[in-house]
Image: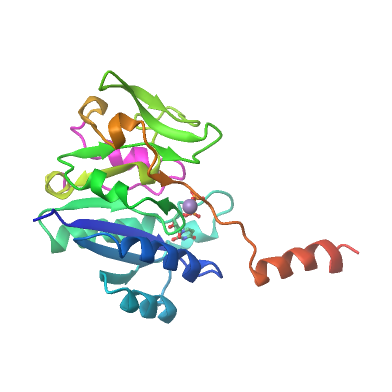
């Protein structure tokens, strides 16, 4: 009996939403023993998302968790997907006592091997994430099987300079840490969450993906190329300027 994977996916309404979720859903359809928590940054569930989830045959929850209004209105970088992930963490706290939790953004690219890698996480496991920052990859550095530090294009004083797609957490371990949460702090969501799992030190990380030598997940980002986006660009560059 395989430990259950609780996969938390933040998502939000935009022209690309169903395309992203179709790709992710059809990846997850190849993975056994998962419970998929799809959480929309919205005040109402999007019916197209509900329909898609029902067609997959995957065990799922379709939840909503809007970004707080004050943060939504703020200019500049916003904490994307934090309200959603917090909702997912709280759902897990209230509905299960074991398994493994993973944050899977809707737009990344997942080799199904990554789900085998994380399945037997005891505390926190980590692996490389491709296409991450200007360095091209974000990963723990491993020498002779031993953790040495982190390789990441934006360390910014973080204790855990890693990407959201680069770690999984054991749920028993999480439940022993009632204060664990993700901060509404752009760029510091991963570090804040991992630090809130204290006591937990980098040397305890369970190294996966062949001692972090293999890439099974990529931080891909979809180019805005929707009809709506194209029209915006057209009107902004021609009609309004000329
Ligand atoms: N997201 C969200 N609300 C937003 C923007 C993003 O729920 O207003 C979700 C998005 O669907 C994704 C995650 O939060 O699953 C991270 O967002 P994004 O992929 O835009 O961030 P990036 O990859 O650029 O860091
Ligand atoms: Mn993304």
Camera sees residue 103: yes
- The reply, left or right, for residue 179 in relation to residue 238 is left
Counting from the top left corner in percent of width and height, residue 144 is at 27, 18
> Whole-percent x and y of residue 180?
23, 45
Which residue is outermost to the right? 242
- Residue 179 visible in this rendered orientation of the protein: no
Within the image, what quadrant is residue 44 found in?
bottom left
The region drawn magenta spans 177-200
Vertical placement of residue 44 versus 155, above or below: below
At horizontal 35% and vertical 32% (from top left) the residue drawn is 160
Q: Against 204, is 100 above or below?
A: below
Picture residue at 11% right of the left edge, 53% below the top: 98
* Of the pair 60 and 235, the residue shown nearer to us: 60
- Image location (x, y in percent) of residue 147: 28, 23
Q: Is residue 97 magenta?
A: no
Q: Say how the picture is coloured.
A: rainbow
Pick whichever, 80 or 219, lies toward us.
Answer: 219
Which residue is drawn at the image coordinates 48% and 59% (left, top)? 70
Q: Is residue 196 magenta?
A: yes
Dividing the picture into quadrants, the one containing residue 81 is: bottom left
* Quarter of the picture holding the C terminus: bottom right
Residue occupying the point 39% across, 60% down: 10
Q: Quadrant of residue 140?
A: top left
Q: In the displayed structure, would residue 156 be above or below residue 51? A: above
């Amino acid at each position: 009996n395989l430990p259950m994977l609780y996969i938390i996916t933040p998502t939000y309404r935009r022209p690309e939403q169903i395309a992203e979720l179709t790709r992710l859903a059809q990846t997850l359809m190849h993975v056994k023993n998962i419970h998929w928590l799809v959480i929309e940054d919205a005040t109402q569930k999007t019916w197209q998302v509900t329909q898609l989830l029902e067609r997959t045959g995957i065990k799922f929850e379709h939840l909503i968790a809007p970004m707080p209004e004050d943060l939504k209105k703020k200019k500049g970088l916003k904490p994307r997907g934090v309200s959603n992930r917090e909702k997912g963490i709280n759902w897990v706290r209230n509905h299960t006592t074991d398994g493994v939790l993973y944050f899977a953004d809707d737009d990344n690219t997942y080799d199904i091997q990554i789900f085998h890698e994380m399945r037997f996480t005891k505390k926190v496991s980590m692996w490389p994430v491709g296409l991450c920052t200007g360095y091209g990859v974000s990963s723990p550095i491993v020498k002779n099987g031993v953790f040495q530090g982190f390789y990441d294009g934006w360390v910014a004083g973080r204790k855990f300079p890693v990407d959201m797609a680069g770690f999984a957490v054991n749920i028993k371990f999480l439940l022993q840490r009632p204060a664990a949460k993700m901060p509404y702090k752009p760029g510091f969501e991963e570090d804040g969450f991992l630090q809130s799992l204290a006591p937990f030190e980098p040397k305890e990380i369970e190294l996966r993906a062949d001692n972090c030598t293999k890439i099974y997940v990529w931080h891909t980002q979809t180019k805005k190329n929707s009809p709506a986006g194209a029209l915006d660009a057209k009107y902004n560059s021609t009609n309004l300027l000329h």
